[in-house]
Amino acid sequence: MSRAVQSGRKGVRAVRAETEGHKRGLAYALVAVVVVAQIFVAAHALVDLPKVDGWAVWNRVMRLLAGEVTWDQYLFLPHGAHLHSVVYLVAWADYHWANGRQLLMTVVSYLATAGCALFVAGRVLAWMEREGISLIVRLSGAVAAAALVTNLADYETLMQPFQVVMSVSRLTYLSLLWYLIKVLRRGSVGAYVAVVAASCLAVTFHGAGHLFAAAFALLHVVFSRRPLMALGAPLPLIVGIAVQKHYSPGGGELGALGILLSSPDMAGAFLKAVCAYFATPINYLWPVVGERTLLSMGFIVFAVTTAFAAYGTVLAFAARLPLGNGRQWNVSDEVAMAWVIAVILALSGAAAAAFWIVRVGAGNAGEAYRSVLASARYGAYASLAWSIFMGVAVLGLARFRAARHAQLGVTLLVTLAAVWPAATLARFYTFDDHLNIAAAALSMGFSPTHPEGEAVWPGVKDDWYWVDALPMTAAFLRIDHKGPWSHLPALHATNGGTVERWPVAAAAVRPVETDRRRATCHLEGRLEGVDPGGVPRSVLAPVVNYGNEVIGYAVLTRASAEGDHRPLKGYVLCADAQRAGPAGLYLTQAQTGWVAAAEGDEGIAPFDLTDATWIQGVARNWPGFFVADVPEARALFVPGTILRFADGQLRVVQRQEVANGYLNVFVTGAILDGGSVGFPHKVAVLN
């Protein structure tokens, strides 16, 4: 072959490589647009206040700072039944460097989500490129895969900062499995040691870590080239089980799995719950198409995913058998990755179904699928099954020339299904408004177990631990000026007119019926002529009187925003609102520069008595103290009230008892140190 011919062929290959590079660049640009757009919409629904599981994280931060848990316990004590070490690590940094506003948690979560979207889109793009799929279908498929990862049907992962645990662990597990495939097939020993070490740490990130560890071992069986590498296969699983066993108090749902075999009807309930798991990326269609159609869609994706996993497993193990000459499974890295993800998804769907059947109990097992559908976070992994389903459908249609035009239709339908929730967010998502209104209530001194503040954790009063721990955690954030209270001024704080304010139109004030002191009122009204600035946000801000004194807090609600009229809901101090009058209420900005009101000599000191039962009014044998039985004390120390003692401890009042003209106040926790919190030190009431 002449040099001219060789040179010409090299030139052609170079041009082709450059062209393919431009095509990939275009694909990633389109992917980036979709990812940024969906994350932008999600970010506009974020609130500084935690919701449900987020409170457990801040509670453990509080306990770490109080010395109640050590650093290793802080990271590795199970969150519920699972390890969640990564969220506790990020939350600690957020508390110290972002004032506990969950800003750092959100940024890390969004970066991980965007990284995962790019990763999955890249694998889908390469998979279709290897199979010779047309450019337009490849571009559409990559966009669809990215849109699925950032699908706002999974509003928990996208709009609850606590789910940084999901977004970071998902990206970590997918990246490590991808890296492991490459290392096992053609990598060095050093690279292998690195991926094993990283995997042993990552297995503690999330409850899915055990499934990741099982997939880690499975890849060794299929692709390992060196016998010594088999020694590293079980290490992540061993580490995960060992850490879980060492730090877990025991019990939980795992001990009740026998319920799955208790009745022949359990098989049907289990299958419905599994189908519901795979339908979570389109759970927003539930009220539109009904349960039967939704579960049918989930079944189709489940069947394709499971069949793909089973078929790949048969081929993979057949290659390792003597008939296959012990060779590696001869597929591309992308197909190998899709196969191992499919295996994980099949196991994950089964685990979710079993969990909820156990959780709801044998008598309600037939309804477990509804709990699965309502758990939007399952969409974080189930969306990967939809990408696999899309890939299998596109490649299957490629085998039939007459059906190839349908490939684009498949990818476009998947894309539409994944972006539709972002386009209709205001119709189905109102948690940001509810949380901000609850934050306003907490800022007025209500407990998160009070009806006005319970949106932060609906049903918490039924939990024996959190009914006391949640109020203390909320008080901890509030008095430490973290979360929304890092920038909200306190009641009666003043500002000399240096901030902009807007009059509340059509202000309506009425007492909060459940306020035992009758001091707090509901406030409703609207702001007129306010530009929402594009996408309306739910905004929590102080309410001031004419003299710029904070007398309450209100929320500009997003879900019901119309044009330049923004509805407003919140709370004000009744007496101050009455003095200001309906025309004297203003909404202003929550920012620095406020001057706090001088603190009065509030609180009541325990009774000055020391004997065999009391140390300066503090009980020696039970957690609590006593004061004179007067109406003021009875009103202050009612059950649920949060107290701060002189040593900084926070406790919750459990009950009060009258004895011989005195009022005994029982609180949560251990016995108090009378020498440091007893008379003459006062007990401050925080709500």
Image: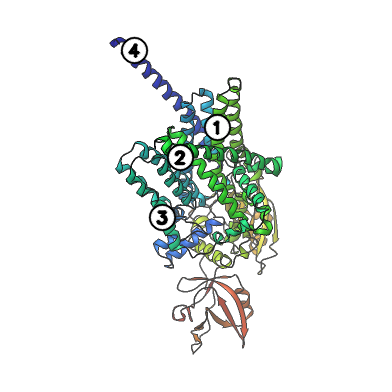
Nearer the observer, disc 1 or disc 4?
1
Q: Residue at x 42, y 47 (%)?
A: 217
Residue 524: x, y in percent? 68, 53
Circle 3 Cα neighbour tier, 10 Å, few/some/many (<14 / 14–19 / ≥20): some
Quarter residue 388 falls in = top right
Q: How much space separates mark 1 and mark 3, taking CA atoms?
A: 34 Å
Q: Which of 316 and 128 is in front in this view?
A: 316
Q: Which amino acid does label 3 sit on?
A: Ile
Image check: 459 left or right of 673?
Answer: right
Q: How much space separates mark 4 and mark 2, taking CA atoms?
A: 44 Å
Q: How much space separates mark 1 and mark 4, taking CA atoms?
A: 37 Å
Helix, strand or loop at label 4? It is helix
Q: What residue type is labelled 2?
A: Phe
Discs 1, 4 touching: Cβ within 8 Å: no
Q: Is residue 160 above or below residue 36?
A: below
* Picture disc at residue 392: 1
Q: What residue type is labelled 1?
A: Val
Q: How much space separates mark 1 and mark 2, taking CA atoms?
A: 21 Å
Circle 4 Cα neighbour tier, 10 Å, few/some/many (<14 / 14–19 / ≥20): few
Could you tell which of marks 2 and 3 lies nearer the N-terminus?
Answer: 3
Image check: 8 left or right of 502?
Answer: left
* Picture disc at residue 8: 4
Helix, strand or loop at label 1? It is helix
Helix, strand or loop at label 2? It is helix
Is residue 504 shown to the viewer in this render?
A: no
Discs 4, 2 touching: Cβ within 8 Å: no
Indicate the quadrant containing the C terminus: top left, top right, bottom left or bottom right: bottom right
Indicate the quadrant containing the N terminus: top left, top right, bottom left or bottom right: top left
Could you tell which of marks 1 and 4 lies nearer the N-terminus?
Answer: 4
Nearer the observer, disc 2 or disc 3?
2
Task: Give the residue number, with chain letter if any, for mark 2.
Answer: 317
Nearer the observer, disc 4 or disc 2?
2
